[in-house]
Image (spheres, rainbow, N blue to C red):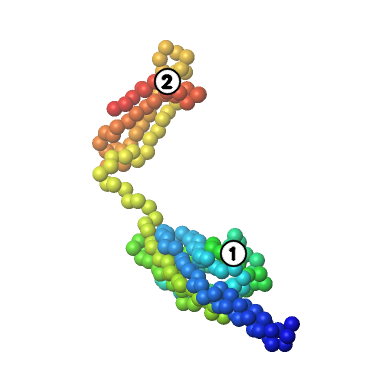
């Protein structure tokens, strides 16, 4: 091979390598946090999701999330079952943000969960409150491949359903021992039902049914 031809081959090999690297890093990786909801006191595990990471391109990530500290509190970051479960990691939580630094000797690719972030909904949060869980920093490597980000919203829902005051439900009931024993021609089953309204209250619909040991219905003693 002549010297001129040798340099020509080397030149095109280098150009092909640069072109391949450029195409790989030209891809934009979508990164997102899904919307969710929770009640005061709940623990919420939010995933950071990634899609279509090109092969052999990502070996580190620097992530910072912000949130409304009057509604939620960041508690920890979990890596088990994620794309970066084998990477070294460190995270730091301050009042209204959490920073994560991740790196590994093996690259990641494809789609899946990057990390899980564990939040606690404050007991002082009220239904209707919300917190945007937003990216203030999301960088792979030194800035390539680039990312497109989607923030998530955590909305606060009530802890329980309020009682309908128009429902006439029993406040308590008592079923006594029958007497005499059931081998007699007849037996008496004492019971008491107290209405939720006004202590004793107005009559409410009551049903008293007998079942055998197999759970089969034997007789309805009362349905009124």
Residue at figure coordinates x 59%, y 64% from the top left: 83
Place of residue 73 in the rendered image (x, y in percent of width and height, measured from the top left):
47, 68
Residue 166 shows in the view:
yes
Circle 1 packing at 10 Å, graded few (<14), some (14-19), many (20+), is some
Q: Which of 113 and 111 is in front in this view?
A: 111
Residue at figure coordinates x 31%, y 48% from the top left: 163
Place of residue 19 in the rendered image (x, y in percent of width and height, measured from the top left):
57, 78
Which of pointers 1 and 2 indicates the residue nearer the eye?
A: 1
Query: As drawn, is 120 to the left or to the right of 199?
Result: right
Residue at figure coordinates x 51%, y 72% from the top left: 27
Q: Residue at label 1? A: 83
The total of numbered circles placed on residues is: 2
Q: In which quarter of the image is residue 167?
A: top left
Q: In which quarter of the image is residue 4?
A: bottom right
Query: As drawn, is 4 to the left or to the right of 81?
Result: right
Circle 2 packing at 10 Å, graded few (<14), some (14-19), many (20+), is few
Q: Residue at label 2? A: 218
Cα–Cα gap, marks 1 and 2: 59 Å
The mark nearer the N terminus, 1 or 2, is: 1
Place of residue 170 in the rendered image (x, y in percent of width and height, measured from the top left):
33, 38
The secondary element bearing badge 1 is classed as: loop
């Amino acid at each position: 091979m002549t010297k001129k031809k040798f340099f020509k081959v080397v030149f095109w090999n280098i150009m092909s390598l640069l072109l391949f690297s450029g195409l790989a890093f030209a891809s934009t990786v979508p990164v997102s946090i899904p919307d969710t909801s929770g009640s005061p006191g709940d623990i919420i595990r939010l995933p950071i999701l990634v899609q279509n990471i090109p092969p052999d391109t990502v070996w580190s990530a620097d992530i910072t999330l912000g949130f409304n500290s009057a509604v939620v509190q960041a508690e920890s970051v979990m890596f088990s079952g994620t794309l970066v479960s084998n990477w070294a990691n460190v995270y730091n939580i301050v009042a209204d943000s959490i920073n994560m630094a991740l790196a590994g000797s093996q690259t990641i690719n494809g789609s899946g969960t990057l990390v899980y972030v564990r939040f606690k909904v404050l007991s002082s949060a009220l239904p209707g409150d919300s917190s945007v869980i937003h990216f203030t920093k999301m960088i792979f490597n030194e800035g390539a491949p680039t990312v497109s980000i989607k923030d998530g919203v955590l909305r606060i829902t009530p802890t329980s359903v309020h009682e309908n005051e128009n429902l006439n439900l029993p406040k308590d009931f008592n079923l006594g021992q029958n007497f005499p024993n059931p081998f007699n021609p007849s037996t008496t089953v004492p019971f008491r039902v107290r209405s939720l309204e006004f202590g004793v209250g107005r009559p409410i619909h009551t049903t008293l049914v007998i079942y055998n040991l197999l759970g089969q219905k034997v007789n309805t003693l009362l349905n009124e």
